[in-house]
């Protein structure tokens, strides 16, 4: 079964995410792929969803941010889109305030792990806004930096408002923060389709160790084939590098009838016993992690 690809469109308010989405929908249509959209907005009414053609399946996530308050809603909407539409690709347009790690965490549900392939985070930056970012509050400045740091593709938009000197300065600053993602200068978020297709944010078994070093925020999914010892799993957790930010999924211990839902956030583990059998998928999210090494440790449990 082919997995549905999913892309996260990130970037601060007004940077050009909806403009990019419209551009991508045209490109996907030309490529003959079935596309669906998830649109997250803070308000209770979506403005941007009117920008999407009526023939594109669209689900709105209103009244909160997918990275925090409405995580469960996103999981349910994704499930519905996958069942009802079975699209080739889904674009999730986040609110300007969404943190990329939390958004990635929401998308990578252990229950949907075998149906979805997270292709990457595309961050749109408004060039002038970037140069003036110190006028924003410290929290927002940090958020804008995180959106740039974790992107797999960077779009420096609104070129028409920038001088050559400013374009060079922004590109240098942004590539200094994130040297791994290609950065493209654009007008109206117009990018070549090939740039989207070449994005990779997900660990594949066949990837060489050397290529993993050059990637930043990545995810990895492991499926347990058997029950395991709690003590060994505990030792495994203690051996993990600090740059693993999140783990969530189902693990079944040797003396239990059903799996535990396991959540791990910045070093703190939580276990909750389930009351039915669930697929033993575990999703990992981390930065600059050699997933091959983690996989070998998991195999030894
Ligand atoms: N001058 C100029 N304006 C642009 C460009 N790209 C987008 N815009 C305009 O910038 C405004 C914001 O663009 P959107 O695509 O709605 O931005 P967004 O990131 O989706 O905005 P939010 O949904 O509010 O976060 C719109 O009025 C666009 O027409 C560009 O390259 N140059």
Image (cartoon, rainbow, N blue to C red):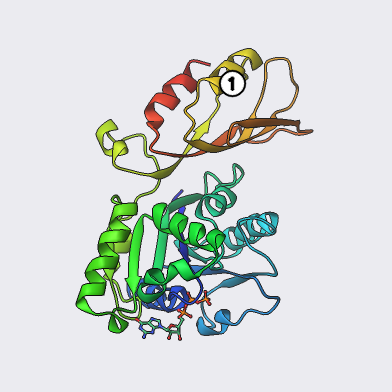
Q: Position of residue 266 (x, y in %)?
A: 58, 36
Q: Quadrant of residue 182?
A: bottom left
Q: Out of 233 and 268, give the one closest to the viewer.
A: 268
- For image coordinates 47% across by 64% down, the residue present is 10
In the rendered view, would you say 240 is above or below 55?
above
Q: Residue furthest front?
A: 135
Q: Callout 1: helix, strand or loop?
A: loop
Q: Which residue is mark 1?
A: 226
- For image coordinates 39% across by 40% down, the residue present is 203
In the rendered view, would you say 285 is above or below 151?
above
Q: Out of 10 and 293, give the one closest to the viewer.
A: 10
Q: Position of residue 2 (x, y in %)?
A: 44, 51
In the drawing, does residue 101 fall left or right of residue 83?
A: left
In the drawing, does residue 208 fall left or right of residue 280?
A: left
- Ligand 1 neighbours mark 1 (CB distance < 8 Å): no
Residue 257 in view (yes/no): yes
Q: Position of residue 8 (x, y in %)?
A: 47, 60
């Amino acid at each position: 079964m082919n997995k549905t690809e999913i892309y996260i469109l990130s970037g601060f308010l007004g940077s050009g995410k909806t403009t990019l989405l419209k551009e991508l929908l045209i490109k996907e249509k030309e490529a003959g792929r079935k596309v669906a959209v998830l649109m997250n907005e803070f308000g209770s009414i979506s403005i941007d969803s009117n920008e999407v053609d009526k023939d594109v399946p669209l689900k709105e996530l209103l009244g909160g941010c997918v990275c925090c308050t409405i995580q469960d809603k996103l999981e349910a909407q994704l499930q519905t889109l996958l069942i009802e539409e079975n699209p080739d690709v889904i674009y999730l347009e986040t609110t300007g305030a969404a943190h990329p790690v939390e958004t990635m965490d929401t998308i990578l549900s252990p229950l949907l792990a075998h149906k979805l392939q997270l292709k990457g985070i595309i961050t749109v930056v408004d060039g002038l806004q970037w140069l003036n970012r110190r006028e924003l509050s410290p929290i927002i400045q940090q958020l804008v930096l995180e959106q740039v740091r974790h992107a797999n593709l960077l779009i420096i938009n609104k070129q028409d408002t920038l001088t050559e000197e400013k374009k060079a300065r922004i590109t240098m600053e942004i590539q200094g923060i994130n040297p791994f993602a290609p950065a493209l200068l654009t007008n109206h978020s117009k990018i070549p389709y090939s740039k989207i297709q070449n994005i990779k944010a997900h660990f594949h078994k066949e990837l060489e160790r050397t290529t993993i070093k050059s990637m930043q925020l990545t995810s990895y999914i492991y499926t347990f084939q058997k029950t395991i010892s709690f003590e060994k799993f505990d030792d495994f957790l203690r051996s993990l590098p600090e740059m693993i930010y999140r783990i969530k999924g189902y693990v079944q211990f040797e003396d239990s009838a059903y799996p535990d839902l396991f959540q791990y956030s910045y070093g703190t583990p939580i276990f909750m016993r389930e009351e039915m059998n669930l697929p033993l998928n575990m999703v990992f999210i981390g930065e600059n992690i050699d997933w091959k090494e983690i996989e070998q440790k998991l195999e030894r449990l």
